[in-house]
Image (cartoon, helix red, strand yellow):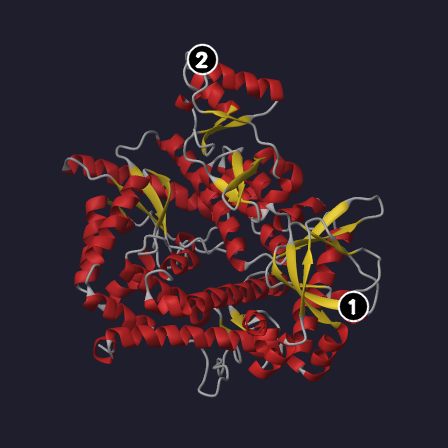
Amino acid sequence: MLLEDTTNFLKDIPPFQFLEPAAVKALAGKMSLEFYPQNTIILKQDGPPSETLLVIKKGGVKVFIRSGDGEEVLTDYRGEGDLIGYLSLFSGDKSRANVATVEDTMCYVINKETIQALYDSEPIIREFFHKSFVNKYVDKTFKEMHNKTLMIGGGTDTLMFTTTVGELATKGVATVSKDVSIQEAAAIMSTNKISSIVLIDENSVPAGIVTDRDLQDKVVSKGRDTKEKVSNIMSPSLIKAEAREYCFEALLKMLRYNIHHLLVVDDGKLKGIITNHDLMMLQGKSPLSFAKDIESQFTIEGLIPVSLKVNTVVNLLLKEGVKASNISKIISELNDRVVRKVIEMAEKKFGQPPLPYCWIVFGSEGRKEQTFKTDQDNAIIFANPASPEEKQKAKEYFHTFAEFVRDGLIKCGFPPCPADNMASNPEWCQPLSVWKGYFGDWISRPNPEAVLKSLIFFDFRPIHGDFSLAEDLRMYLIKILKDQNVFMAKMASVITKNRPPLGFFKTFIVEKSGEHKDEVNLKINGTGPLVDVVRIMALEAGISETSTLERLEKLKEVHPTARDLGEELANGFEFITLLRIHHQVESIEKSGSPDNFLNPNKLSNLEKKTLKESFQIISKAQDAIAAQYGPGMVGG
């Protein structure tokens, strides 16, 4: 049973997942299991090299180095399935970093002779360690130590992407019964010199949080009776962070929900609290600082230089090995703030709008999958007017309004949409009833143009104004899509024709001539087909999320294709997107502008293999969609 468990574990762990089953089983038989209590130093900087390769089964470790002045610099955090000791094991040199457990940790142990034999006999193992691991972590460590002013400034920037929330969280959170008075709660906060207090119910479960801002905004400014129960002013919707999340994930939540405190939980139990001040102290000038800089601007001219700096975050995140999806999330959050700021300037310039409205975005922006600034894809939904006169007044106001926003965003580095899919186009600045009419017509009469528009606009997401208008439209879309097999089949027909560029013998299909000879388009033929497949499954299942990975996470519970292929599709999306971002950075360095065309012959064997496997998974998902709707329907 132990041998079987170990074998099954290794089957999903790189690089061992690339071995033949017999080799995996043989390796499993030579491994042992070791327990390391929390705070155990497994490897010591400048100490003897590792004599074993460890594979984390459960728990986690942090990797850090100490500079000459004794400063601790965290370079990595590793969890289940990650490896420890490979650098010093293969080099035979002294350990270059400290490795310490952050919780009780179980590791599989592979002795030096076993892994060396595997290294000598398996080319894929050699390439995996050299290309994917050794180079990555050597570069990472030295950049951390020697380039502390790299990109945005301050070596501590990188800690946002390697430090867990649990490590930073303030321990011993102050709690109080939700039934005490405001005065009692305020007194406890004052005595302990803290900016927040957690309220608990009769079962000692967190029920809410009260911050110093709540006391100012809800009590002092309102002249409220301090003898009232403190629960009357608490914020009951607690936004939490898991202890093992990285700090940039806490940053995202604070940006998204505009909050300054996050409770930190570990296996459901309250572990501590983290504040925006904690993150600012940790990271110095980075995404949170950019957000602050954006918010402090009140003119387009002031916003331009701040906005143009946002793309520099991409380089920082890439050098720290951050997942592609997380790069996109941070960039999208910052870009959203730029867009909202320009819209707020428009509101100030043109005065109160005649009707409530919602500014929506779609395309990669709507899916929160932006990297470098992409074309503007936006629209306006405004409330249904009560009369023709009111409708005309609204149209005139919002047309001028949208032109101002369009021009402002162009100045901030967001090019206009070549197809004019923008709010400044009167066709895409309409009342809710017209938008419902658009969607209804596209679905009931799914000609090629209608299907193309649905592929663009159905990924809409609200970013400013009255979100209920967008939510109303989303619910309407979900409702009218139910049992619309003809429309779904037409959409399936369109998306399954755009196949990943992989031939019958698993060779890449490249451009035969022209400017991009011998290259593949990673956007149109890579992430594009994957995004399309996930979208149609999400529309079919009535899922309201627009992000590809968020859609997949929901779909794995309800859709058979996603249940079978969801994990692999998610991994493929991450890999292709990251490959695309890396290529775009290189393109900018060479020509000044990013593109999506890559020559696969310039990839390593492992990268080629992973790209081919990603394309194969996308093709499998397309085949499943085609089979679902039948050859007759999809081919129509």
Name the amino acid, label 2: Thr
- Residue 5 lies, in percent from the top left, at 55, 70
In the structure shown, which secondary structural element does the residue marked by tag 2 occupy? Answer: loop
Residue in the picture at 24% in, 67% down: 488
- The disc placed on residue 51 is 1
- Residue 615 lies, in percent from the top left, at 46, 75
Question: Which label lies toward us, 1 or 2?
Answer: 1
Say which of 111 and 474 sits in front: 111
Does residue 498 appear left or right of residue 212 in this picture? left
Q: Quadrant of residue 293?
A: top right
Q: Quadrant of residue 501?
A: bottom left
Residue in the picture at 22% in, 55% down: 439
- Kindly report the distance in space between the C-alpha atoms of the residues bearing marks 1 and 2: 64 Å
- The disc placed on residue 613 is none
Residue in the picture at 21% in, 53% down: 479
Q: Which residue is mark 2?
A: 226
Task: Check if mark 1's residue and mark 2's residue have beta carbons within 8 Å.
Answer: no
Q: Quadrant of residue 109?
A: bottom right
Within 10 Å of disc 1 (Cα), the crowding (few <14, some 14-19, many 20+) is some
Q: Is residue 442 above or below residue 383?
A: below
Say which of 23 and 412 sits in front: 23
Does residue 338 appear left or right of residue 59 in this picture? left
Q: Is residue 564 above or below residue 253?
A: below
Residue in the picture at 61% in, 82% down: 23
Q: Residue reaching furthest bottom?
A: 505
